[in-house]
Image (cartoon, rainbow, N blue to C red):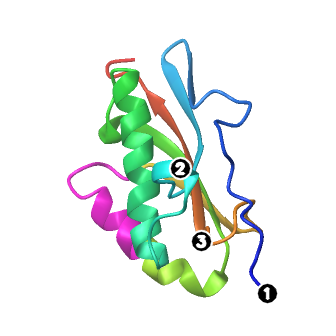
Amino acid sequence: MSQPDLAPRRQPQFSSHRRAGELVFVSGQMAFGEGFRIEGDDVAAQTARCLQRIADELGRAGLGPGDIVKATVWLARVEDFAAFDQAYGAWFAGHILPARSTVRADLMVPGALVEIEAIACQPGA
């Protein structure tokens, strides 16, 4: 028996990012591709996709990965932490790592292994 397709069909009811003064808050990003389907078979690939989605949102606000000051991460499986951490660190190569909280949680979309949200600060602020 196949699982029901629970991936969202449209943008959920929230802003993808929101500016508040010098800060930009990027909502939690999952490894969505076309049609809101999860891309990536492992946590490393999904982590890279989440972070690219965050970079895309920051770009719309005139910021980049080096402007991230805080990230919050939810992992579906504790055993994925080492692979996640390695992919996360590689993605931030050349930038100061942001402060981060990482917790294990049940994620809302089947197949999602990681969700990441970020707070960035306007340079010079």
Label 3 CA crowd tier, 10 Å (few <14, some 14–19, many 20+) = many
Mark 3 lies on a secondary structure that is loop
Q: Which amino acid does label 2 sit on?
A: Gly
User: Residue 35 location in percent, x, y?
Assistant: 53, 50
Q: Name the residue under label 3.
A: 113
Q: Specify the quadrant that holds the C terminus.
A: top left
Image: magenta residue range:
86-97
Q: Where is residue 40 in the image (x, y as percent from the top left)?
A: 44, 71
Q: From the top left corner, tell me how far across and down residue 16 is, in percent.
A: 57, 32
- Mark 3 and 1 residues: CB-CB less than 8 Å, in contact? no
Give the residue pinned by disc 1. Answer: 1
Residue found 69% across the figure and 69% down from its top:
110
State yes or no: residue 84 in magenta.
Answer: no
* Rendered view: 121 above or below 80: above
Question: Is label 2 or label 3 in front?
Answer: 2
Marks 1 and 2, Cα distance to the nearest angstrom?
A: 23 Å
The amino acid sitting under disc 3 is Leu
Q: In this view, does 33 lie to the left or right of 30?
A: left
Instruction: Establish if 66 lies above or below 103.
Output: above
Residue corresponding to mark 2: 35
